[in-house]
Image: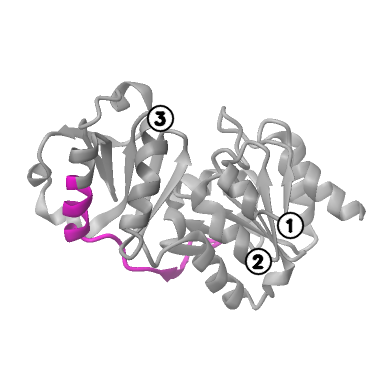
Amino acid sequence: MKMIVMDMDGTLLTQNQQILPYTKEVLMNLQKQGVSLVLASGRDISSLEYYGKQLAMDQYPQSGYIVLNGLEIYNSKKECLHREQRLTKDDLMILNKIAQTSFFDMIIFFETCLYIFDYGHTGIMEDHFIDRERHMVHDIHEIPEHLFSTIKKVAFVQSETMMSEKIPILQKQMSSRFSICRVEKDWVEINPVHASKGQALLKLAQIKNISLDNVVAFGNGENDIDMLKIAGTGIAMDNSFDTVKEVADAICEDNEHDGIGKYLEGEIKC
């Protein structure tokens, strides 16, 4: 085991957005032994760095970050190692039409702010804590033109029932252009089809000259599936979607009960 790749929400982090002390201790000890820790998330680097500091990752050059669902790869010092082409304005126009006709709330994440479209009336402004400048708009043409070069990702929000009905259809229809993945039961994230955590893991393993056979990956969402497939050992959390569990090599305890820490400790003892 030379590299441990971990999704964040629902995997490494509890519902309260914490890394549990036991899991933290196990990860820190492995990092001291030369094992690479990689945080892989739909979040951006500034958000992941907060947790990287808790694990002292900046002190270990072998560690790093996969951010925005694979769009960018960073080393432990926040230096960008690789960057993929992001969504374009044309992509946003297509996604905007889908959101309108399917009654999804849509959130467009830009570098400095985000725009929310209340097509699904889910109460996203009230129900989700979003710690950056945000705008509620009704027409995509209200977005200033200069922002379209700074797109990070797009999210759709709607009830679990509607997501279960509509997202599988969209995934098939738009598979040649977009990667559409359920991250939570009511939250879907969209990226260019060529960008994924799995493809980023491939690139990072090549950069670090680490065999994928020596990589262990943990995840719980559909955006983790290809990462679990590509890693030598892919572990699904007990709280994962069934589609994630189906592709995993093993299932560990959930994110609220030190699933990662207990699995890794067991591997060390073996």
Residue 140's disc is: none
Expressed as whole percent of the image width and height from the top left, the position of residue 119 reads 20, 32
Amino acid type at mark 1: Gln
Answer with left or right where residue 78 lies relative to residue 3. Answer: left
Quadrant where the C terminus sits is: bottom right
Residue at which label 1 appears: 31
Marks 2/1: CA–CA distance: 9 Å
Marks 1/3: CA–CA distance: 41 Å
Q: Residue at x 63, y 55 (%)?
A: 247
Answer with left or right where residue 245 lies relative to residue 163. Answer: right
N-terminal of the pair, mark 2 or mark 1, is: 1
Residue at which label 3 appears: 161
Q: Residue at x 65, y 78 (%)?
A: 209
The boundaries of the magenta stretch are 75-97
Q: Are marks 2 and 1 in contact (CB under 8 Å)?
A: yes
Expressed as whole percent of the image width and height from the top left, the position of residue 83 reads 40, 68
Is label 3 in a helix, a strand or a loop? helix
